């Protein structure tokens, strides 16, 4: 009887270790992507910010709403991007905070994804550089969301197995 109980406990421990290892493997690509996104976001902020400022000051807009919306949208993107990347890094590297990861996912989807769509496709005046940088940002955001969902589900699985 004790042999079967010991074997069952060993199997459960091995399963938990495998799940924990899988969680760490899932976290690594997301951690790397967030790390490089820090640099890309800085580049994006400088280049798109300069383009938006140039378009705001020197281009004529037929739609006044589009002209008025340009700077506040960029400001919101800039503020939320700093918060989003900090929370994502904190949720992945510092501790397995599911709440931080959920916050990262939600901030990635709204407003960042929609602002990237606006910058890439919906502005009245779209320069080719807007499209190129915006498409890269959309690709990075969608990749981060997919990876973060995978990491979140593995954290939930580890938590469920630990109970």
Image (tube, helix red, strand yellow):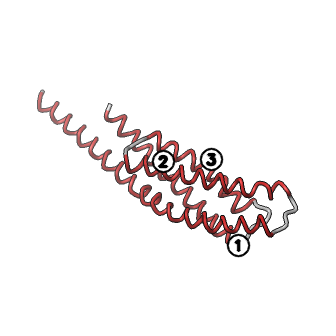
Asked whether the residues under the numbered discs 1 and 2 touch, taking CB atoms below 8 Å apart as contact, a structural biologist would say no
Q: Residue at x 82, y 54 (%)?
A: 65
**Which mark, by number, is residue 84?**
none
Q: Residue at x 45, y 60 (%)?
A: 35
Quarter of the picture containing the C terminus is top left
29 or 12, nearer to the observer = 29
Q: Earlier in the sequence, mark 3 or mark 1?
A: 3
Q: Residues within 10 Å of mark 3 (few under 14, many from 20)?
A: few
Q: Position of residue 59 (x, y in %)?
A: 81, 68
Task: Examine the image and state in which quarter residue 45 appears.
Answer: bottom right
Q: Which one is in front in this view, the residue at disc 3 or the one at disc 2?
A: 2
Helix, strand or loop at mark 2: helix
Measure how far apart labels 3 and 1 are at the Cα level: 25 Å
Q: Earlier in the sequence, mark 3 or mark 2?
A: 2
Asked whether the residues under the numbered discs 3 and 1 touch, taking CB atoms below 8 Å apart as contact, a structural biologist would say no
Q: Which one is in front in this view, the residue at disc 1 or the one at disc 2?
A: 2
Relative placement, left or right, of 12 versus 90 is left
Q: Is residue 160 above or below residue 29?
A: above
Pointer 1 residue: 128
| Outermost residue toward the top in this view | 1
Q: Is residue 45 above or below residue 145?
A: below
**Which mark, by number, is residue 87?**
2
| Outermost residue toward the bottom in this view | 128
| Outermost residue toward the front in this view | 57
Q: Residue at x 76, y 54 (%)?
A: 69
Q: Position of residue 106 (x, y in %)?
A: 56, 44
Quarter of the picture containing the N terminus is top left
63 or 156, nearer to the observer = 63
Pointer 3 residue: 110
């Amino acid at each position: 009887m004790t042999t079967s109980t010991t074997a069952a406990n060993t199997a459960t421990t091995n399963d938990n270790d495998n799940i924990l290892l899988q969680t760490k493997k899932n976290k690594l690509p997301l951690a790397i992507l967030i790390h490089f996104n820090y640099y890309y976001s800085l580049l994006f902020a400088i280049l798109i910010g300069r383009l938006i400022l140039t378009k705001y000051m020197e281009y004529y807009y037929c739609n006044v709403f589009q002209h008025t919306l340009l700077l506040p949208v960029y400001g919101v993107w800039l503020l939320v991007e700093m918060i989003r990347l900090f929370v994502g890094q904190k949720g992945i590297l510092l501790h397995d905070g599911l709440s931080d990861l959920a916050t990262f996912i939600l901030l990635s989807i709204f407003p960042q994804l929609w602002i990237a769509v606006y910058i890439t496709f919906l502005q009245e005046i779209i320069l080719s550089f807007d499209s190129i940088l915006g498409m890269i940002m959309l690709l990075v955001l969608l990749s981060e969301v997919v990876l973060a969902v995978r990491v979140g589900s593995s954290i939930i699985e580890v938590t469920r197995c630990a109970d």
